[in-house]
Image (spheres, rainbow, N blue to C red):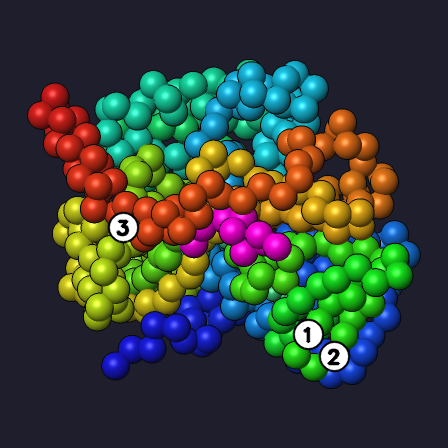
Amino acid sequence: MINTSSTMFHWRMLSREPEYPLTVVDTDIETDVAVIGAGLTGLAAALRFARAGARVLLLDAGRIGQAASGRNNGQVIPHYGSHTPQDIEAQFGPHRGAIFNRMVGGAADGVARLVRDHDLACDFVQKGWIQACHATSSVARVRAVYDGWKERGYQAEWLDRGAMTDHIGSSVFYGGWKAGSGGYLNPYAFCQGMARAAGAAGVDIRQNSAVLDMERVDRRWLLTCPGGKVFAREVMVAANLPQSAFWPGIDKVSVPVRVYQVSTGRLEPDWQARILPGREGVSDTSRVICAFRYDSDGGLAMVGQHTLWHDAANRGRRAVAARLRRVFPGLPLQMADRYWEGTIAAVVDRLPRLMALAPGLNFAGIYSGRGVALSVAWGDMAAGLALGDVAERDAPVPVTRLRTVPFHAFGVQYARYMHPRLRAQDRREVAQSENRG
Ligand SMILES: Cc1cc2nc3c(=O)[nH]c(=O)nc-3n(C[C@H](O)[C@H](O)[C@H](O)COP(=O)(O)OP(=O)(O)OC[C@H]3O[C@@H](n4cnc5c(N)ncnc54)[C@H](O)[C@@H]3O)c2cc1C
């Protein structure tokens, strides 16, 4: 029987970073800044606050790397989830749009800097990220994405169908583009390394310390954790999918999308030479998430989704093997190897949030599945805003009040059961493309 909620999952097994020591809130604590959530957003925010000289307490309900930031596919992507850079400038205007585009377009290089500056042992491979068209119907849109980044001076290469076949080692894709600064890393190791860097900068990290409640008392925030109270002048919420309603509506800012991943185990050397010889990471344009990359073992790690989660691990391992055999005919996989799950925090417009909830209480995050590179830039920028180093007019998106997902309960159900409809759309488009030859 496979334990699907296992805390000992693939990236943790491969990680070379030491695990950050466990300390919990077990007494009352006074601090300048409390950051809620020690994923990548919270770690980056905490690091910036500490560098500005503040006493910083970073609180997490669980352990470092056990939420989305440590369980993801590790693809470091300098691109939006669904927007083109042109869309962003049209929506937010030339000033904010250019700032947002610079942030997203430069996010992978930002990760590279962090890896270098803090000597993070997270197996970062920066050889590019490929967005591959699963069907002919997505080519025009992807071409617009490529044009947008190219015109703005980013390393972007258009790959026609033949070039894509050479890059991926598969002829099932209809072209696409490559972002030269993209790549992939071990996300669990990246989190542990970021925790090490934050700790070295003076951040006090407390794990297994969920914030259950929060109130304003004498111009300070009073946070209640199971083991004690925290008094802070400033609070940054970086909780992505907040696990408790510690502030009215905070548990409704995003909806969860449950996904799984499977790693294949080491591929034979001849297959490693044929599949992704340039070692880029890949996401395709299908509606059901499809992304894969090598791990440090020489296996492929691939994302998948179920509608029903019975016997999820075995079904996931079979489904990923079948999918990989379709992309790489002849690949000798009957059933892939390790299985683990994670939960994406999503919003309908797929744009990250900056929210001012009350004086000295801000929220940052929600990347709808594209947060590995952006979260560290976003957390840093959000802390800069709170410190007054970044002016509000220079924020990449407008700072809003609390924004909950409209009809949240419905959204949660929709996210849970949308998979068959999306899969049917993908299949129809693939069939149409194949019929056209
Ligand atoms: C399976 C999967 C694959 C993905 N693949 C990719 C990818 O390849 N590339 C990419 O760019 N993005 C990917 N993503 C998205 C990316 O992982 C996230 O966008 C990013 O990690 C979000 O970081 P975060 O710090 O905002 O949130 P999280 O990592 O979710 O951290 C939030 C933290 O807040 C804590 N918390 C919640 N409530 C409380 C509370 N009440 N008190 C204290 N702490 C609390 C949680 O315990 C958690 O540790 C993927 C996500 C998943 C799940």
Which quadrant of the rendered structure holds the N terminus?
Answer: bottom left
> Is residue 83 in view from this perspective?
yes
- Mark 1, Cα crowd under 10 Å, few <14 / some 14-19 / many 20+, is many
The secondary structure type at the circle numbered 1 is strand
Q: Is residue 401 above or below residue 331?
A: above
Q: Which residues are magenta?
A: 248-256
Residue pictured at 22% horizontal, 36% vertical: 426
Mark 1 within 8 Å of ligand 1, using the beta carbon: yes
Q: Amino acid at mark 1?
A: Cys
The secondary structure type at the circle numbered 3 is helix
Q: Amino acid at mark 3?
A: Tyr
Q: CA distance from mark 3 to mark 1?
A: 34 Å
Q: CA distance from mark 3 to mark 2?
A: 39 Å
Q: Which residue is mark 1?
A: 225
Q: Is residue 97 above or below residue 406?
A: above
Q: Quadrant of residue 168?
A: top left
